[in-house]
Amino acid sequence: MTMVAWRVYLFQSGDLESGRRERETDYMLFHIDPVDFTHDFLDEATAYFPRLRLSFDIPHKLLLITIPSPEHAAAIGALSEETRRDLDSMGHGLSHAIKSYPGGGTRAQNGKGKDADIAFGPRRRAVGERANGNEKRYTVVAEIAISETETKLKRDTDFWLDPLCGNANLVITITASRKLAYIKIDTWQRVNDQAHCTGSLSITKTTQGRVKVTGPLRIPFDALFDRAPTSPAERAISLSVQRLQSLAEAIWEDQGI
């Protein structure tokens, strides 16, 4: 296995002059034999590195590993917690009908695949349902962008919405500024064979410490559960302004903002 690694350092104002490193994000690119890759990374019985975030292209023998930052972990935990709180408020055991998959991965028919920052899907599936050779089909996927570029985030969104790849119903992208108390959250769905932004909101904090949220985060019930509601209690998941404030504060705490 041949490895090439990049270490990207993120600097705040004045850091270049002082030589101080604020934080770092690691990306490691491997040229790897498909047999070794399957044994070491994909096979649950033999995988050595089950917790790393992976993107891979088996035909070209390429593997990209991303080591998540603390901000990623904070956003993942807060999104999962706040989503389950809203499901709990509906009753009928709906929060137990959904499973979350931090770092969940999928494999496309073309031999490419990647891990999501966090994914969700119903615990119970139709008999025999499989997606592209992977029995775990995620209905809603979230990607958190701290150091990632907009181009990479768009590629990730396209992958998860592609019927031949992730085949998800909805993608949530959370983009956080490295220096400012600013977070942008978009929802994406497939419309006319293209990824289409179906909702957008922002979260900011003033110099006086006041947090402003431009709207709730709405996840359609059918997108998450992969079925239509069957009772008035079954409604769209809505993360309120207060819940989104909690999510933002979890990220900013780890950023020191």
Image (spheres, rainbow, N blue to C red):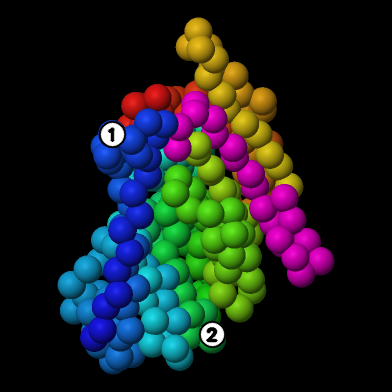
The residue lying toward the viewer, choosing from 63 and 196, is 63
The residue at which mark 2 appears reads as 109
The quadrant of the picture occupied by the N terminus is bottom left
188 in magenta: yes
| Dot 2 alpha-carbon crowd within 10 angstroms: few under 14, some 14 to 19, many 20 or more | some
Q: Does residue 251 sit above or below 175 in this rendering? A: above
The quadrant of the picture occupied by the C terminus is top left
Q: Does residue 218 sit above or below 113 in this rendering? A: above
Q: Residue 82, which numbered label?
A: none
Across and down, in percent, residue 93 comes to 46, 41
| Three-letter code for the amino acid on which mark 2 is drawn | Gln
Q: Residue at x 51, y 62 (%)?
A: 138
The residue lying toward the viewer, choosing from 14 and 7, is 14
Q: Does residue 65 sit above or below 174 in this rendering? A: below
Location of residue 235 (image quadrant): top right
Magenta-highlighted residues: 178-197
Q: Most extreme residue toward the right, as rendered?
A: 192
